[in-house]
Amino acid sequence: MPSTFTAEWDRLLVMTKSHHLLAGELACLDTCWPHAHAHAWAIDQMPSPAYCCSVDGHIVHRNAAADRIWGELPAPFENVRWDGFAKIRDLDGQPIAMDASPAARAALGESLGPVEMTADCYDGHARRVISHAKPIFLEDGSVVGSFCCLVDVSEKRLLEERSRN
């Protein structure tokens, strides 16, 4: 007998199979990610930037809020790895290698807490973001990628800085 959780995901999967935006974007997930279409549907509903990466860093799904925070991405998009930023830096201004980014670390199975960092967009804008990255596990315990959610705290940090001065 399937659990209520599994039954609900199966119901969402059936509901979203015909969702035209998912057909091409998530074809690569169908063979390895559980209930890929249902997960994509849930990510699309989130108001904050959210995306999933495969274990090798390809962004396999992103929502509209992620597109907005990243801005214009270089073509071909397939060459963008781990997130849609041109560069990320720690709060001391030191560059963070993309393979050491929160998304990459989560794809290795590391369960991180929130990581605040500065992110440079390809359009030249810099943002202060908090990344919440978690590994995605299959039932057998193997990691198939990472799920990431971003919170843009740029304006909040700017206002805090102004109030201190």
Image (spheres, rainbow, N blue to C red):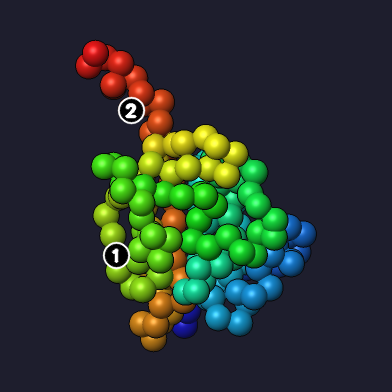
Would residue 120 be visible to someone looking at this image? yes
Give coordinates of residue 70: x percent, y percent.
Answer: 56, 44
User: Against 38, is 118 above or below?
Assistant: above
Q: Earlier in the sequence, mark 2 or mark 1?
A: 1
Q: Is residue 32 left or right of residue 129?
A: right
Give coordinates of residue 109: x percent, y percent.
Answer: 33, 73
Q: Tell me if mark 2 has few (under 14), some (14-19) or many (20+) residues whose alpha carbon lies within 10 angstroms of its own.
A: few
**Closer to the camera, 80 or 55?**
80
Which residue is at a point 74% across and 67% down the rendered structure image? 24
Q: Secondary structure at mark 1?
A: loop
Kindly identify which numbered label has been placed on residue 65. none
Kindly identify which numbered label has been placed on residue 157. 2
User: Against 38, is 6 above or below?
Assistant: below
Mark count: 2
Give coordinates of residue 98: x percent, y percent.
Answer: 43, 61
**Closer to the camera, 16 or 140?**
140
Which residue is at a point 39% across and 82% down the rendered structure image? 142
Q: Residue type at mark 1?
A: Ser
In the image, farthest residue toward the front: 94
Viewport quadrant of the C terminus: top left
Q: Residue type at mark 2?
A: Arg
Q: Secondary structure at mark 2?
A: helix
Give coordinates of residue 3: x percent, y percent.
Answer: 44, 74
Q: Which residue is mark 1?
A: 111
- Callout 2–callout 1 Cβ contact below 8 Å: no
